[in-house]
Image: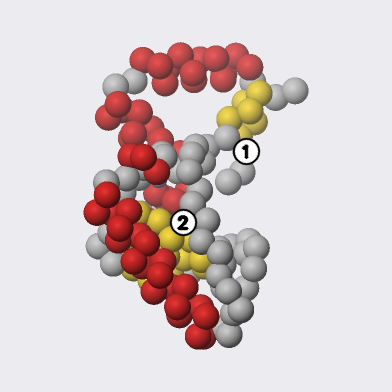
């Protein structure tokens, strides 16, 4: 995700605002900043390769390797420990199936399954 350049003052004000938010307000704020939530809401174009009620899988716009897929829950979670166990199980069942499809369809020699666990929004002070 692209970095947002804001002044030190703006960053301080934003950090103060975030501190005052309830957990619900914070989640809504995060969802508005989250590129993946924008994709899931259909506000940003993507190439879906799989979708069900719980997850969406997309082709990465900047693939590290052929067949690079992003698989995500439709619900926004900032970090993996927030994801309910049944959703974690579902994500891994779908990743197993996608991995199998890749091995067969593009004759891949292997697949990597990586969990991005943490804040997607990067706020940096202007220097
Ligand atoms: Zn999100």
Identify the image quadrant of residue 7.
top right
Q: Look at the picture and state if 23 lies above or below 43.
A: above
Where disc 2 sits, the SS reads: loop
Residue 31 visible somewhere in the drawing: no
In the image, 24 versus 13, the foreground residue is 24
The percent position of residue 65, horizontal first and vertical second, equals 64, 68
Residue carrying label 1: 3
The percent position of residue 113, horizontal first and vertical second, equals 51, 61
In the image, 37 versus 43, the foreground residue is 37
Badge 1 local density, few (<14 within 10 Å), some, or many (20+)?
Answer: few
The percent position of residue 77, horizontal first and vertical second, equals 36, 42
Residue, x 58% and y 85% (percent of image)?
107
Identify the image quadrant of residue 57.
bottom left
Q: Quadrant of ligand 1?
A: top left
Residue, x 49% and y 37% (percent of image)?
119
N-terminal-most mark, 2 or 1: 1
Q: Look at the picture and state if 106 lies above or below 43.
A: below
Badge 2 local density, few (<14 within 10 Å), some, or many (20+)?
Answer: few
Whole-angstrom CA distance, mark 2 to mark 1, is 17 Å
Residue, x 30% and y 61% (percent of image)?
90
The percent position of residue 37, horizontal first and vertical second, equals 39, 49
Residue carrying label 2: 44
Q: Are marks 2 and 1 in contact (CB under 8 Å)?
A: no
């Amino acid at each position: 995700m692209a970095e947002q350049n804001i002044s030190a003052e703006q960053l301080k004000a934003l950090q103060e605002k975030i501190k005052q938010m309830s957990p619900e307000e914070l989640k809504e704020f995060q969802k508005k900043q989250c590129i993946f939530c924008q994709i899931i809401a259909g506000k940003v174009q993507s190439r879906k390769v799989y979708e069900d009620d719980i997850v969406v899988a997309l082709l990465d716009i900047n693939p590290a390797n052929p067949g690079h897929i992003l698989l995500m829950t439709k619900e926004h979670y900032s970090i993996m420990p927030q994801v309910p166990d049944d959703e974690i199980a579902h994500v891994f069942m779908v990743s197993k199936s996608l991995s199998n499809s890749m091995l067969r369809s593009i004759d891949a020699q292997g697949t990597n399954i990586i969990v991005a666990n943490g804040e997607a929004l990067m706020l940096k002070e202007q220097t």
